[in-house]
Image (cartoon, helix red, strand yellow):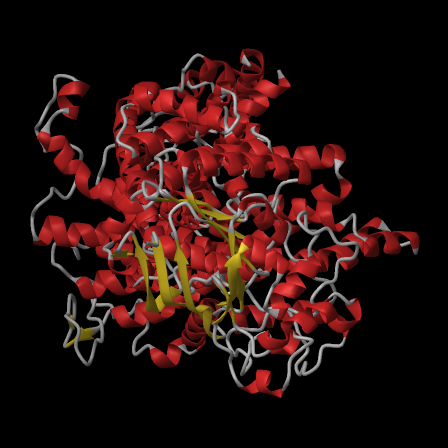
């Protein structure tokens, strides 16, 4: 196997085995109890989830509403008690856009994470369990997926299909399963040799039953690890695509706001109140994904973080 | 005139469980050309004592008290630069685990040449010639200079490390368990090399080991450490003939001894105490078959028991009788006053870095 | 030794070609299956039906898909990427013209990022447990989480618009023409334009080598041969650089393969923020203008650059790690 394909998480290092649902739940709680950073990450997401749910009550205006007074657009207003973060050059309230942007970010982040983790897990399970040509084929595919430039592909896909956040999720699902799939495969290779799998086989369980009832639970934490990393990737990707102008024009997202600022000369006017907040929100939510991922890593690979 | 004088040295480790005094009030004199063996079980502070002498201590260690005078200079008062200048040129150290003390990515000869040029100030040609010489001294072929550490056997690596230690002609050599990881035959060969070089080069040596037979083979004097303290100090001969501390009796029982072969090995029950909360009185009392009430309350001081022979025990007067008892395995099975279950203490040496 | 190295190289190159083949095949069908007439941007509304048919023939679009695919592959092998609908000139010329700019930007930022990352990783490991380390790690995590275009926008606002130190867009000042690439590369003007985009990319890219170098260093610093070096009276600098860093560096080079891949993708965004005339900007413009041949060509070239650089990094790793070399020799 090529060196390039080596994941940053050493697959050779065997993660701590987990079996049984109770132990699995307990392990997930342990992640947040033991790792302060993971807890911080979870709190950040919780915060954004609350903001997204309560958006209509928090945001003083509708995000795309052009605010007028006496028939005059209130464009390029600086921050004030009325417009916390000022207004855009079209007289839209920046703070309200920021609040509604969290909805898009979370929607894209979580659905992409689920898609990536799901595909990666199934690929890893199937490749690792069945071996042979299935394994070879899937791992060659993963090699290829590693060689495809990610963002350009997303742009082309989104532009050719139609600009919607679901196509961004689709593009991510098409490529990013590779890391998850690879790591889970190597884990399945060790798990399937364990006694409880043999026991299940002797008791007459079919392949699918063994795969999803016996092996899958013990590799789920790995799926969670890669899923939580994918949240950040997805939010970043959506932002980049929107920034490049291929986003859904009817959906307000943080990337959309930055594109708006970019093309509206916010930079030359020094409108930091417009430029800084959306980027900070993206950064925070991506960091939160990293933090949670680190928490899982710490539980799964205790030796990794020894120093 | 001593080349090395240690007075009331204390070395402390900060650990998560509290402060550990791994070395707790040690005083030692080492004369030129003396070959001192420091013995004791692991966790008694031997390695810490050795590392304190060149101030290569783990990050969580500190020296709150004491002095170490080497050729009249207080090593603890030197600046970092001064102590570094002294290392290897004056005091060379053969570390524990010297198996892994060679850098795997450089050829052994290159590492020898590096120390000769960087620390010894030789030019590359002279360094190379000296490296060949040194390898011959320790019984290695000069071709081996061009090999990588992983191409060496354990014994060869040990010889190479000895050659490195001797490279700059140090006046004091510190050796930490120099043969522990080797098999018995190789151990013997290495110790022979050691013995020969000690004599030839007129070295002063402090050798730390848990293996009392090593001391018998290459040392002329002995210091016994227990729980961070020196509990007995003597010439090798008197030490083996008439030990004065029950711990020394126990150690002599527990090891096959080339000088005094014994039929039966008797282990000392239990482990050295946890130094976060050391026992009151004599620290050996919980494991000592001869402990009396006094031993559990009052800490015995190191006192003279003969010419050049000191021991820290309340019952040195009765030692002749106790030695006879100590030869009986039964004695060691009925240790009185053992309160808490004895378990191995956690090593204080490794400090975990704070989570970023 | 030579034989096994050749076998390894051939295998690795074959794998790279396979990746490229899959990419171009995917591209071909993606663009053909896209809704609407692929010539929509090319066709003037005043064209008659006949003229349109003629154009379709000219671009080979009247033939069956399978034939088109084979023709397409054949052309690709010959470096023939078709004509741009928009510029009406050969795609290959257009993309090759901007390719150097992308490479300059990528290599400059990678060089800076890996230089800073490796040195910073050593520094943070050396000062482990200190405030400096905590701040360094936090800063790096932030740069890895921040969207590159946003960092670029902030740099632009501060250093180009507010302070006026650097130009805000392009690779050369308007109206400047250079006699040769070399003239451009040695001009002050070009590098002044390079500063902000390269900094933006490097800010993002340095995180991986830095964090990796730091954790490798921390591991190596626990090794006995480092303690031995302390006993030997070596300076901290010598221990860090000659003894620890040398051992910690190898995995960083492996990671570089991944870093290269991401940086080519990241270029797309940064080039657009800074109006840097490179492949990424060309791709975005072509996609936006439905200039399919040009978009395909730009994408293809980006994939080629990425695959090639991954290949180089892989081979470099094999050269640098004595154990891999030894393994290959042992096989022989």
- Residue C47: x, y in percent? 34, 26
Question: How many marks overall?
Answer: 0
In the rendered image, is residue C302 in sight? Answer: no
Based on the displayed image, in which of its 4 quarters is residue B48 positioned? bottom left
| Front residue of A257 and C158 | C158
Q: Is residue C148 above or below residue B275?
A: above
Residue at position x 39%, y 41% from top?
C244
Residue A207 falls left or right of residue C328 = right
Which quadrant of the figure contains the N terminus of chain C?
top right
| Front residue of C217 and C2 | C217
Extreme residue in the front direction = B307
| Front residue of B260 and C283 | B260
Q: Is residue C318 above or below residue A183?
A: above
Q: Is residue B100 above or below residue C19?
A: below
Extreme residue in the right direction = A203
Residue at position x 8%, y 27% from top?
C176
- Residue A42: x, y in percent? 48, 70
Which quadrant of the figure contains the C terminus of chain C?
top right
- Residue B53: x, y in percent? 37, 55
In the rendered image, is residue B353 in sight? Answer: yes
Residue A181 falls left or right of residue C45 = right
Based on the displayed image, in which of its 4 quarters is residue B324 positioned? bottom right
- Residue C44: x, y in percent? 31, 29
Residue C269 falls left or right of residue C39 = left
């Amino acid at each position: 196997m090529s060196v390039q394909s080596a994941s940053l998480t050493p697959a050779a290092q065997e993660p701590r085995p987990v079996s049984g649902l109770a132990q699995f739940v307990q392990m997930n709680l342990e992640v947040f109890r033991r790792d302060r950073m993971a807890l911080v990450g979870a709190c950040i997401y919780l915060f954004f989830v609350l903001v997204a749910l309560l958006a209509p009550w928090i945001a003083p205006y509708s995000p795309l509403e052009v605010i007028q007074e006496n028939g005059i657009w209130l464009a390029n207003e600086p921050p004030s008690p009325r417009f916390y973060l000022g207004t855009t050059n079209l007289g839209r309230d920046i703070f309200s856009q920021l609040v509604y942007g969290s909805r898009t970010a979370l929607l894209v982040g979580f659905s992409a994470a689920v898609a990536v983790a799901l595909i990666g897990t199934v690929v890893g399970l199937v490749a690792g369990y069945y071996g042979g040509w299935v394994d070879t084929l899937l791992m060659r595919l993963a090699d290829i997926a590693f060689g495809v430039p990610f963002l350009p592909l997303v742009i082309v896909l989104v532009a050719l299909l139609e600009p919607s956040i679901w196509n961004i999720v689709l593009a991510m699902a098409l490529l990013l399963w590779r890391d998850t799939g690879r790591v889970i495969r190597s884990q399945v290779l060790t798990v399937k040799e364990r006694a409880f799998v043999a026991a299940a086989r002797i008791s007459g369980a079919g392949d699918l039953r063994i795969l999803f009832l016996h092996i899958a639970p013990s590799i789920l934490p790995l799926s969670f690890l890669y899923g939580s990393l994918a949240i950040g990737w997805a939010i970043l990707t959506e932002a980049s695509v929107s920034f490049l102008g291929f986003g859904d024009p009817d959906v307000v997202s943080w990337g959309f706001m930055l594109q708006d600022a970019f093309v509206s000369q916010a930079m030359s006017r020094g409108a930091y109140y417009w430029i800084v907040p959306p980027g900070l929100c993206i950064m925070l939510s991506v960091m939160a994904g990293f933090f949670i991922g680190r928490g899982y890593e710490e539980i799964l690979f205790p030796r990794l973080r020894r120093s | 005139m001593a080349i090395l004088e240690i007075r009331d040295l204390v070395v402390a480790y900060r650990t998560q469980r509290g402060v550990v005094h791994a070395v707790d009030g040690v005083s030692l004199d080492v004369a030129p050309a003396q070959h001192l063996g420091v013995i004791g079980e692991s966790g008694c502070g031997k390695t810490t004592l050795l590392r304190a002498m060149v101030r290569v201590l783990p990050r969580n260690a500190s020296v709150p008290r004491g002095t170490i005078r080497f050729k009249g200079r207080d090593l603890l008062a030197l600046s970092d630069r001064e102590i570094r200048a002294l290392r290897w040129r004056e005091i060379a150290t053969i570390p524990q685990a010297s198996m892994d003390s060679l850098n795997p990515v450089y050829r052994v000869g290159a590492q020898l040449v590096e120390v000769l040029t960087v620390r010894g100030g030789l030019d590359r040609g002279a360094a190379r010639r000296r490296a060949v010489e040194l390898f011959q001294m320790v019984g290695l072929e000069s071709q081996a200079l061009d090999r990588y550490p992983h191409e060496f056997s354990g014994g060869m690596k040990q010889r190479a490390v000895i050659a490195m230690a001797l490279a700059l002609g140090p006046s004091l050599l510190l050796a930490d368990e120099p043969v522990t990881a080797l098999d018995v035959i190789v151990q013997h060969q290495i110790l022979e090399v050691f013995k020969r070089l000690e004599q030839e080069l007129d070295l002063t040596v402090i050798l730390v080991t848990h293996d009392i037979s090593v001391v018998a083979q290459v040392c002329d004097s002995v210091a016994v450490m227990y729980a961070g303290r020196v509990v007995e100090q003597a010439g090798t001969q008197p030490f083996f003939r008439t030990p004065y501390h029950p711990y020394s009796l126990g150690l002599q029982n527990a090891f096959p001894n080339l000088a005094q072969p014994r039929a039966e090995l008797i282990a000392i029950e239990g482990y050295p105490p946890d130094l976060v909360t050391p026992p009151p009185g004599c620290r050996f009392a919980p494991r000592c078959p001869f402990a009396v009430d006094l031993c559990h309350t009052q800490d015995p001081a190191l006192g003279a028991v003969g010419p050049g022979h000191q021991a820290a025990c309340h019952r040195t007067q009765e030692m002749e009788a106790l030695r006879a008892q100590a030869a009986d395995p039964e004695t060691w099975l009925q240790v009185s006053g053992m309160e808490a279950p004895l378990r191995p203490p956690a090593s204080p040496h490794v400090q975990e870095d704070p989570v970023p | 030794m030579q034989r096994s190295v050749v076998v390894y190289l051939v295998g690795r190159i074959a794998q790279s070609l396979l990746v490229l083949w899959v990419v171009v095949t995917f591209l071909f069908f993606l663009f053909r299956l896209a809704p609407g007439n692929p010539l929509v941007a090319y066709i003037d509304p005043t064209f008659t039906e006949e003229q349109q048919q003629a154009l379709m023939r000219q671009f080979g679009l009247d033939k069956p898909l399978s034939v088109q695919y084979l023709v397409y592959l054949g052309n690709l092998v010959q470096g023939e990427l078709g004509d741009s609908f928009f510029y009406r000139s050969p795609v290959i010329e257009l993309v090759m013209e901007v390719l150097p700019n992308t490479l300059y930007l990528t290599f400059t930022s990678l060089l800076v990022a890996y230089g800073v990352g490796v040195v910073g990783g050593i520094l943070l490991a050396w000062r482990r447990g200190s405030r400096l380390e905590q701040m360094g790690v936090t800063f790096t995590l932030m740069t890895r989480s921040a969207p590159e275009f946003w960092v670029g926008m902030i740099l632009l606002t501060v250093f180009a618009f507010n302070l006026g130190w650097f130009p805000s867009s392009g690779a050369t000042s308007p109206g400047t023409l250079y006699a040769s690439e070399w003239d451009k590369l040695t001009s002050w003007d070009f590098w002044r334009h390079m500063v902000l985009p390269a900094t933006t990319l490097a800010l993002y890219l340095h995180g991986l080598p830095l964090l990796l170098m730091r954790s490798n260093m921390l591991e190596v610093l626990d090794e006995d041969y480092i303690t031995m070096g302390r006993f030997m009276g070596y300076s901290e600098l010598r221990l860090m650089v000659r003894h620890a860093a040398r051992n910690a560096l190898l995995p960083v080079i492996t990671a570089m393969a991944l870093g290269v891949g991401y940086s080519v993708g990241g270029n797309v965004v940064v080039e657009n923020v800074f109006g840097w005339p490179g492949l990424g900007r060309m791709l975005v413009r072509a996609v936006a203008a439905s200039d399919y041949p040009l978009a395909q060509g730009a994408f293809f070239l980006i994939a080629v650059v990425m695959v090639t650089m991954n290949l180089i990094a892989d081979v470099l790793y094999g050269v640098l790690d004595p154990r891999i070399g030894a393994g290959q020799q042992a096989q022989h």
